[in-house]
Every structure is written in C-alpha cells, then in structure tokens.
Amino acid sequence: MALVDWDAGRYETTAAELAPVAEAVVERAAISADQDVLDIACGTGNAALLAAARGARVVAVDGAARLLEVARRRAHTEGVAVDFREGDLFDLPVGDQAADVVLSVFGLIFARDPSRALREVARVMRPEALALITAWIPAGPIDAMLTAMGRIVARVTSRPPPKRFPWADPEAVTAIAAEAGLILDATTRAELPIAAASPEAYVAAGEEHPMALAVRPVVEHAGVADEIRHAMTAELREANENPNGFLVHSPYVVHELRRG
C-alpha cells in the first residue's frame, strides 16, 4: 500500500467515531489534575482533550499538521489547554521521563517499527508511569470489510497485503515490550459500536479516509472502485445489527504497560 498522508481527506469522521474509545481509555487511566499526560498520534485530540478537561497537563503529538490544527480549534472551543506538537513516533518532541501517563488510541499501531516505537514510549515514561495503547482485533465486520478491499487491491497489484505486527496479541506485545524495558500489566477486550444511516452510507463516508485515498490511484487505474464498494457493502450488510439503519460492533483491546 502507498504511504498514507494523514492530512488528506476527512479523518475527522473516523476520529468522531472513535471518541468512545478515547473516553474509555482516559477513564481507565484514572487521569487526575496533578499528572503529566502524553497523547501519542493524537489525531484530532480526542484523548488529549478529555485528559485536559480533568485538569492534567497534556502534551499531544501527531505527524499530521492539519489534524493538529483541527485539535487546536477543538481545544479552544472546549476551553481546555493542550500543548499540541508536530512530531514523529520514533522521535517524540518531549524530554526523558516526562510523562506520568502515556496514551495512544489506535495510533502507535501504525508504527513501521513497533519495537522502536515502544522504546520511545519507554523513554518518556517516569518510573511509576502507565501507558495505555489500543489496538484493533483482526475480527468482526469492519475487519471483514477492510479485508475484502485488501483482497481486490492485492489482486490488481499482484502484491499480497502488507504483513502487520499483531498488536492485539498480548504475547507478541509482551515480547517487544520487554525489549523496551516495559511490562504488559493487563490486556482488556472491548467493542466499539459503529453506526450510520446505512451500510452504503458508511462505505461512502469511508472513501475520504486517508488510507482509502492512499490506494485510490491504484483502484481507479484498475477500474475496480465499484467492485470494492460492492464487496465492502456486502460484508457490512451481512453483519448489520439494525435493519432500519446500520449498526455493528468492532472489537479492540487496551494494553496497559508499565516500566520494568
């Protein structure tokens, strides 16, 4: 797959969809006003804004300048203070042992080198700090929808889908966490409800996701846009829990890590 430009399209739609996960993570972290919080790959600021609303001192980092501007506008509107910084997962613009709590809601999982990314997480954590990282479980209707798209893209490009690190697997995370000097304390499974007016409406909205835009030139050149749309919609129709609209549940995990 082509490199993803996270400033492209309308990631805001997906960010709004993911807001309940940020709420669950901030609640689980029990963030308080005396803490320094770092939100990694913050996107439009879901978790960062919630942590700041609890009175925490929050630094939020993302590599997408446009999304950071969206997050800053949200912070201004909500009347909370967050220090938004543009930066890379492998070179976070914060000092050593700067955070009491590190959060990454479906952000760190996109790191090209998961081990290196966790080493950077460990660097910024204080001795008693907690890190919470969410990851999608490769199951459920949204995963099936994306897999359907991936099969078609792989066929027209004659390239297999890229192999991804199994972030949802506690054993795999435990291994790379240990290399970084971290301990996986707990893994909790949950589900995110996802709703829309219809399966077709959900697929249409997803066409402006940065990852969809990354493969659009290939899809349009091969003339398979309609085939992909139909395949994705078919998966969602089969799993739809609401005959009068659209509702599915997407499973994910929350990993809790501490310094070793």
Image: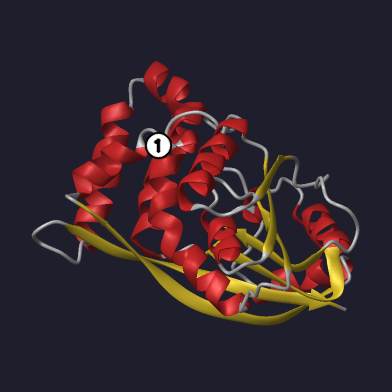
Q: In this view, does 110 lie above or below 211?
A: below
| Image coordinates for residue 197, horizontal then vertical, percent | 17, 50
Left or right, residue 26 beside residue 87? left
User: Helix, strand, or loop for circle 1?
Assistant: helix
Which residue does the image show at 47% across and 52% down from the upper left? 78
Q: Can residue 137 be seen in this view?
A: no
Which residue does the image show at 87% across and 65% down from the upper left? 180
Residue position marked by numbered label 1 in the rendering: 152
| Image coordinates for residue 48, horizontal then vertical, percent | 59, 57
Q: In which quarter of the image is residue 52?
A: bottom right
Mark 1 burial class by Cα count in 10 Å: few <14, some 14-19, many 20+? some
Left or right, residue 130 beside residue 68? right
Name which residue type carries label 1.
Ile
Left or right, residue 208 beside residue 84? left
Tag count in the figure?
Answer: 1
| Image coordinates for residue 56, horizontal then vertical, percent | 66, 66
Q: Can residue 67 be seen in this view?
A: yes
Q: In this view, does 11 lie above or below 171?
A: above
Which residue does the image show at 32% across and 27% down from the upper left? 225
Towards the viewer: 159 or 145: 145
Q: Is residue 78 above or below residue 26?
A: above
